[in-house]
Amino acid sequence: MSLLERIRWVPILAFAVPALLLVLVDWRAGRRQ
Amino acid sequence: MYTGHFGVALASAGLARRVPLALLILATFACDIIEGFVALNNINDRTRVMSHSLPVAFGAGVVLASLWMLRGGRWLDGLVIVVVASSHTALDFVTGVKEWWPGEPLAGWNLYQRPWLDGALEAGVCLVGWGLWMTALPPAKRRTLLAWAPLVLLLVAQFAAVAYHEWFEVASESGLSKFIR
Protein backbone atom coordinates (compact mmCIF):
# COMPACT_ATOMS: atom_id res chain seq x y z
CA MET A 1 0.00 0.00 0.00
CA SER A 2 1.43 3.37 -0.99
CA LEU A 3 1.70 6.34 1.36
CA LEU A 4 -1.18 8.11 -0.37
CA GLU A 5 -3.38 5.03 0.05
CA ARG A 6 -2.48 4.79 3.73
CA ILE A 7 -3.52 8.34 4.55
CA ARG A 8 -7.00 8.81 5.99
CA TRP A 9 -7.88 12.09 4.32
CA VAL A 10 -11.12 12.92 6.13
CA PRO A 11 -9.59 13.11 9.65
CA ILE A 12 -6.53 14.97 8.34
CA LEU A 13 -8.69 17.54 6.55
CA ALA A 14 -10.93 17.77 9.62
CA PHE A 15 -7.90 19.07 11.50
CA ALA A 16 -6.05 20.93 8.76
CA VAL A 17 -8.92 22.96 7.29
CA PRO A 18 -10.11 24.53 10.60
CA ALA A 19 -6.46 25.14 11.54
CA LEU A 20 -5.77 27.05 8.33
CA LEU A 21 -9.03 29.01 8.56
CA LEU A 22 -8.38 29.98 12.19
CA VAL A 23 -4.87 31.19 11.38
CA LEU A 24 -6.27 33.23 8.50
CA VAL A 25 -9.04 34.76 10.63
CA ASP A 26 -6.61 35.49 13.48
CA TRP A 27 -4.34 37.31 11.04
CA ARG A 28 -7.16 39.27 9.42
CA ALA A 29 -8.75 40.15 12.76
CA GLY A 30 -5.51 41.79 13.85
CA ARG A 31 -4.99 40.26 17.29
CA ARG A 32 -3.15 42.80 19.41
CA GLN A 33 0.49 42.16 20.16
CA MET B 1 -10.85 15.50 21.87
CA TYR B 2 -11.27 17.44 18.64
CA THR B 3 -12.37 21.09 18.59
CA GLY B 4 -11.61 21.47 22.31
CA HIS B 5 -7.93 21.51 21.39
CA PHE B 6 -8.60 24.42 19.03
CA GLY B 7 -10.41 26.10 21.91
CA VAL B 8 -7.29 25.81 24.05
CA ALA B 9 -5.17 27.25 21.22
CA LEU B 10 -7.55 30.22 20.91
CA ALA B 11 -7.55 30.78 24.67
CA SER B 12 -3.76 30.77 24.78
CA ALA B 13 -3.64 33.17 21.82
CA GLY B 14 -5.67 35.57 23.92
CA LEU B 15 -3.15 35.26 26.75
CA ALA B 16 0.17 34.94 24.88
CA ARG B 17 -0.47 37.63 22.31
CA ARG B 18 2.99 37.66 20.77
CA VAL B 19 2.83 33.98 19.83
CA PRO B 20 1.45 33.17 16.37
CA LEU B 21 -1.77 31.15 16.46
CA ALA B 22 -0.20 28.67 14.03
CA LEU B 23 2.45 27.78 16.62
CA LEU B 24 -0.16 27.40 19.37
CA ILE B 25 -2.26 25.13 17.13
CA LEU B 26 0.88 23.12 16.38
CA ALA B 27 1.49 22.79 20.13
CA THR B 28 -2.07 21.80 20.93
CA PHE B 29 -2.03 19.08 18.24
CA ALA B 30 1.59 17.96 18.68
CA CYS B 31 0.45 14.63 20.13
CA ASP B 32 -1.75 13.88 17.11
CA ILE B 33 1.03 14.82 14.70
CA ILE B 34 3.42 12.50 16.55
CA GLU B 35 0.76 9.77 16.43
CA GLY B 36 0.70 10.10 12.64
CA PHE B 37 4.48 9.76 12.37
CA VAL B 38 4.49 6.76 14.71
CA ALA B 39 1.87 5.08 12.53
CA LEU B 40 3.79 5.97 9.36
CA ASN B 41 6.62 3.83 10.74
CA ASN B 42 4.19 0.91 11.05
CA ILE B 43 4.42 0.93 14.82
CA ASN B 44 1.15 -0.25 16.34
CA ASP B 45 1.09 1.94 19.42
CA ARG B 46 -2.28 0.66 20.58
CA THR B 47 -2.29 2.55 23.89
CA ARG B 48 -0.94 5.75 22.28
CA VAL B 49 1.78 5.96 24.93
CA MET B 50 4.36 6.97 22.30
CA SER B 51 2.33 9.99 21.22
CA HIS B 52 -0.19 10.95 23.87
CA SER B 53 1.43 10.26 27.24
CA LEU B 54 2.24 13.26 29.40
CA PRO B 55 6.05 13.04 29.04
CA VAL B 56 5.72 13.07 25.24
CA ALA B 57 3.24 15.96 25.23
CA PHE B 58 5.39 17.92 27.68
CA GLY B 59 8.54 17.17 25.65
CA ALA B 60 6.89 18.34 22.44
CA GLY B 61 5.90 21.54 24.23
CA VAL B 62 9.45 22.08 25.47
CA VAL B 63 10.83 21.62 21.93
CA LEU B 64 8.35 24.11 20.43
CA ALA B 65 8.85 26.58 23.29
CA SER B 66 12.62 26.33 22.87
CA LEU B 67 12.32 27.09 19.16
CA TRP B 68 10.12 30.07 19.98
CA MET B 69 12.56 31.41 22.58
CA LEU B 70 15.51 30.87 20.23
CA ARG B 71 13.72 33.31 17.93
CA GLY B 72 13.63 35.85 20.76
CA GLY B 73 10.32 34.90 22.36
CA ARG B 74 9.68 35.55 26.04
CA TRP B 75 10.03 32.70 28.52
CA LEU B 76 6.49 33.32 29.80
CA ASP B 77 5.15 32.72 26.30
CA GLY B 78 7.32 29.61 26.15
CA LEU B 79 5.67 28.41 29.34
CA VAL B 80 2.25 28.91 27.74
CA ILE B 81 3.37 26.79 24.76
CA VAL B 82 4.44 23.97 27.11
CA VAL B 83 1.14 24.10 29.00
CA VAL B 84 -0.85 24.10 25.74
CA ALA B 85 1.03 21.05 24.44
CA SER B 86 0.66 19.23 27.77
CA SER B 87 -3.06 19.99 27.87
CA HIS B 88 -3.55 17.48 25.05
CA THR B 89 -2.99 14.56 27.41
CA ALA B 90 -5.40 15.99 30.00
CA LEU B 91 -8.15 16.76 27.48
CA ASP B 92 -7.86 13.36 25.81
CA PHE B 93 -8.17 11.78 29.25
CA VAL B 94 -11.68 13.23 29.33
CA THR B 95 -12.74 11.98 25.91
CA GLY B 96 -10.71 8.81 25.38
CA VAL B 97 -8.87 5.94 27.04
CA LYS B 98 -5.08 5.99 26.74
CA GLU B 99 -1.85 5.18 28.54
CA TRP B 100 -1.42 8.68 29.94
CA TRP B 101 1.88 7.80 31.64
CA PRO B 102 4.33 5.05 30.52
CA GLY B 103 3.66 1.87 32.48
CA GLU B 104 0.33 3.02 33.85
CA PRO B 105 -2.83 1.11 32.92
CA LEU B 106 -5.18 2.51 30.29
CA ALA B 107 -7.26 5.30 31.77
CA GLY B 108 -9.74 7.96 30.74
CA TRP B 109 -13.39 8.94 31.05
CA ASN B 110 -14.06 7.92 27.44
CA LEU B 111 -16.65 10.56 26.65
CA TYR B 112 -16.44 9.48 23.00
CA GLN B 113 -18.92 6.79 24.05
CA ARG B 114 -21.43 9.59 24.63
CA PRO B 115 -20.82 11.72 21.52
CA TRP B 116 -23.42 14.40 22.16
CA LEU B 117 -22.20 14.98 25.71
CA ASP B 118 -18.65 15.11 24.35
CA GLY B 119 -19.79 17.58 21.70
CA ALA B 120 -21.44 19.81 24.30
CA LEU B 121 -18.32 19.80 26.48
CA GLU B 122 -16.01 20.57 23.55
CA ALA B 123 -18.35 23.34 22.42
CA GLY B 124 -18.06 24.82 25.92
CA VAL B 125 -14.27 24.74 25.75
CA CYS B 126 -14.43 26.42 22.34
CA LEU B 127 -16.76 29.10 23.69
CA VAL B 128 -14.41 29.95 26.56
CA GLY B 129 -11.34 29.86 24.28
CA TRP B 130 -13.01 32.07 21.71
CA GLY B 131 -14.04 34.51 24.46
CA LEU B 132 -10.43 34.84 25.62
CA TRP B 133 -9.21 35.22 22.02
CA MET B 134 -11.78 38.02 21.52
CA THR B 135 -10.23 40.02 24.36
CA ALA B 136 -7.06 40.30 22.28
CA LEU B 137 -8.85 41.88 19.31
CA PRO B 138 -9.09 45.64 18.80
CA PRO B 139 -12.54 46.80 20.10
CA ALA B 140 -13.71 47.78 16.62
CA LYS B 141 -12.96 44.28 15.30
CA ARG B 142 -14.96 42.55 18.04
CA ARG B 143 -18.24 43.63 16.48
CA THR B 144 -17.43 42.22 13.04
CA LEU B 145 -18.50 38.91 11.51
CA LEU B 146 -14.82 38.00 11.27
CA ALA B 147 -14.53 37.96 15.06
CA TRP B 148 -17.42 35.48 15.32
CA ALA B 149 -16.08 33.25 12.54
CA PRO B 150 -13.85 31.05 14.77
CA LEU B 151 -16.74 30.18 17.10
CA VAL B 152 -19.10 29.37 14.23
CA LEU B 153 -16.40 27.35 12.45
CA LEU B 154 -15.56 25.28 15.53
CA LEU B 155 -19.20 24.63 16.48
CA VAL B 156 -20.01 23.49 12.93
CA ALA B 157 -16.90 21.28 12.85
CA GLN B 158 -17.78 19.74 16.22
CA PHE B 159 -21.38 19.08 15.18
CA ALA B 160 -20.16 17.47 11.95
CA ALA B 161 -17.71 15.32 13.91
CA VAL B 162 -20.39 14.11 16.30
CA ALA B 163 -22.78 13.43 13.45
CA TYR B 164 -20.06 11.59 11.53
CA HIS B 165 -19.41 9.33 14.51
CA GLU B 166 -23.10 8.78 15.16
CA TRP B 167 -24.14 8.01 11.61
CA PHE B 168 -21.13 6.08 10.37
CA GLU B 169 -19.99 4.62 13.69
CA VAL B 170 -16.40 5.55 13.02
CA ALA B 171 -14.11 4.54 15.84
CA SER B 172 -11.92 7.56 16.39
CA GLU B 173 -9.05 5.77 18.06
CA SER B 174 -9.07 2.37 16.39
CA GLY B 175 -6.34 0.87 14.25
CA LEU B 176 -2.84 2.15 13.66
CA SER B 177 -3.91 5.80 13.79
CA LYS B 178 -6.89 7.97 12.98
CA PHE B 179 -4.70 9.50 10.27
CA ILE B 180 -2.84 6.48 8.87
CA ARG B 181 -4.12 3.00 7.89
Image (spheres, coloured by chain):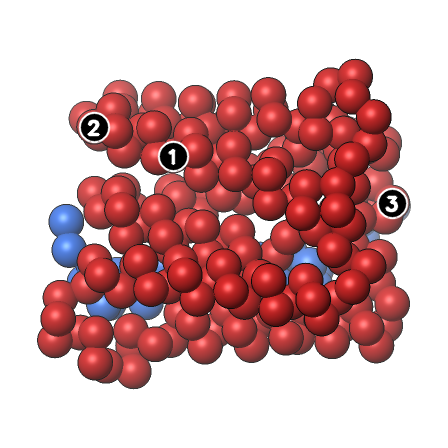
Task: Tell me which chain the residue with mark 2 is part of.
Answer: B
In this picture, residue B35 sits left or right of residue B69: right
**Marks 1 & 2, CB-CB < 8 Å contact:** no
In this picture, residue B74 sits left or right of residue A10: left
In this picture, residue B158 sits left or right of residue B47: left
Q: Amino acid at mark 3?
A: Gly
Local secondary structure at mark 1:
helix
Q: Crowding near pointer 3: few (<14 within 10 Å), some, many (20+)?
A: some
Separation of residues labelled 3 and 2 (CA atoms): 40 Å
Pointer 1 or 3: first along the chain: 1
User: Given this view, does label 3 or label 2 mark the residue nearer the observer?
Assistant: 2
**Quarter in which the N terminus of chain A is drawn:** top right
Q: Which residue is mark 2?
A: B74
> In the figure, B4 relative to B54: above or below?
below
Measuring from the top left, give residue B155's x and y in whole percent.
53, 73
Q: Which residue is mark 1?
A: B81
In this picture, residue B81 sits left or right of residue A4: left
Q: In the image, which disc is placed on residue B99? A: none
Chain A drawing hue:
blue
> In the figure, B115 relative to B146: above or below?
above
Pointer 1 or 2: first along the chain: 2
Q: Which quarter of the picture shows residue B119?
A: bottom right
Chain B drawing hue:
red
Residue pictured at 44% horizontal, 66% vertical? B127
Q: Amino acid at mark 1?
A: Ile
- The answer to whether any part of residue A7 appears in the image is no
Pointer 3 or 2: first along the chain: 2
User: Given this view, does label 1 or label 3 mark the residue nearer the observer?
Assistant: 1
Residue pictured at 12% horizontal, 71% vertical? B139
Task: Tell me which chain the residue with mark 3 is part of.
Answer: B
Q: Which residue is mark 3?
A: B175
